[in-house]
Amino acid sequence: MRHDGKMILFIGVSRSGKSVPVKRIVEKQKRVLAFDPKGEYVAQMGFKGFTDKGEFLKAVRNCSGAGKFALIASDPKSFQFFCDVAFNWNRQAPAAIVCEELAAVTNSSKAAGAWGRLINQGLAYQPLIIGTVQRGQEVDKTLMNNASFVHVCRHNTDDDAAYIASKLGIPVTEIPREPLQFFQWTSDKGIVCRGVIDFKGASGKNWKEGSPRFRAKGKAKLLTLTDSGEFQGVIYR
Ligand SMILES: Nc1ncnc2c1ncn2[C@@H]1O[C@H](COP(=O)(O)OP(=O)(O)OP(=O)(O)O)[C@@H](O)[C@H]1O
Ligand SMILES: [Mg+2]
C-alpha cells in the first residue's frame, strides 16, 4: 500500500537520460499507465500499447490488478483523455502514471482540465505521477511547485540552467552540462545525489544493450522508488 501521493519530475535536454531512470522506476511497479509519444514503453518495457483511445480505455478498465498500458499519442486532447483515464484507474487502486514530454501537451501556467484534476485532487488517492520535460520553463506551475523529487539531467543553455537553478534554490554551477550527468533534488533536503549514467550493467530483458548504472559521486545513494512507491536510496555497483 502506498502512503503518499508523489510527483516526480525529470528535466533535461533530449538524450540527456530522463527516460532511462523513469524506466528503471516503472520496471518495479505493477500497475502503470504511460503517455508514450515515442512508443518506447511498448517497444522496450513490454507495455501493452494503444493508438486508439477507445481500445486503451477498454483495456485499462478491464484491469483491476497488475497491468502496464501505454497510450501512444502526442497531442493535448489525447493527453487530457489519458489523464482522465489515469485519474479513475488510480482511484480503483494506486498506480504509477508516466507523462512523457509534458511541454507538448500542457502549458506553463496552472495545470488545467483532467491534468489539473489528476495532479491536484489525484494526490489524495496516492498516485505516483512521473513527468519528463526538456526545459524547466515549460513545466506548469502546479507540478513545479509540488514536485517532491526532481531529477535534473544535462542542460545546454545558460538561460535554461539559470532558470532551474533559481527554481530549486541552488547555485547554477550545480546544473549538469555534460552528457548523462545528473543530480537529484528533494523538496526537504535539496541535492541528495550527483552522478553520471553508464550502460555497463548486465544486459537483460528490457536492456539488451546493457543496463544503466547510476554512478553516484562520493557516498551518495541514488534516490529511487520501491515497488510500493516509497523513496529508497540505492547504490549501483
Ligand atoms: N541500454 C542502453 N545502452 C546504451 N545506451 C542507451 C541505452 N538506453 C539509452 N541509452 C542512451 O542514453 C541516452 C539517454 O536516453 P534517454 O532515453 O533517457 O533520453 P531522454 O533524456 O529521455 O531523451 P528524450 O528527451 O529524447 O526522450 C541516449 O543517448 C540513449 O541512446
Ligand atoms: Mg525520453
Image: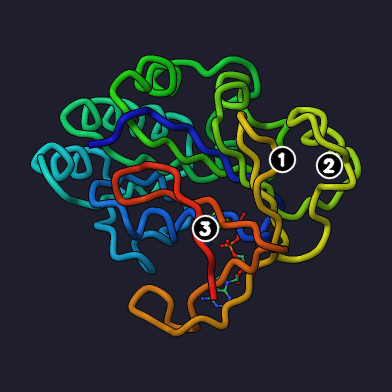
In which quadrant is the C terminus drawn? bottom right
**Which is more N-terminal, label 2 or label 1?**
1
In which quadrant is the N terminus drawn? top left
Few, some or many residues within 10 Å of mark 2 (<14, 14–19, 20+): many
Residue 109: x and y in percent read 64, 17
Residue in front for this viewpoint, 79 or 193: 193
Residue 147: x and y in percent read 56, 29
Quadrant where ligand 2 appears: bottom right
Residue 88: x and y in percent read 22, 26
Q: Which mark is residue 99?
A: none
Residue found 83% across the figure and 52% down from its top:
156
Amino acid found under the numbered disc labelled 2: Ala
Residue of label 3: 21
Residue found 66% across the figure and 63% down from its top:
216
Asked whether mark 3 lies closer than 8 Å to ligand 1, one says yes
Residue in front for this viewpoint, 26 or 224: 224
Q: Which mark is residue 135?
A: 1
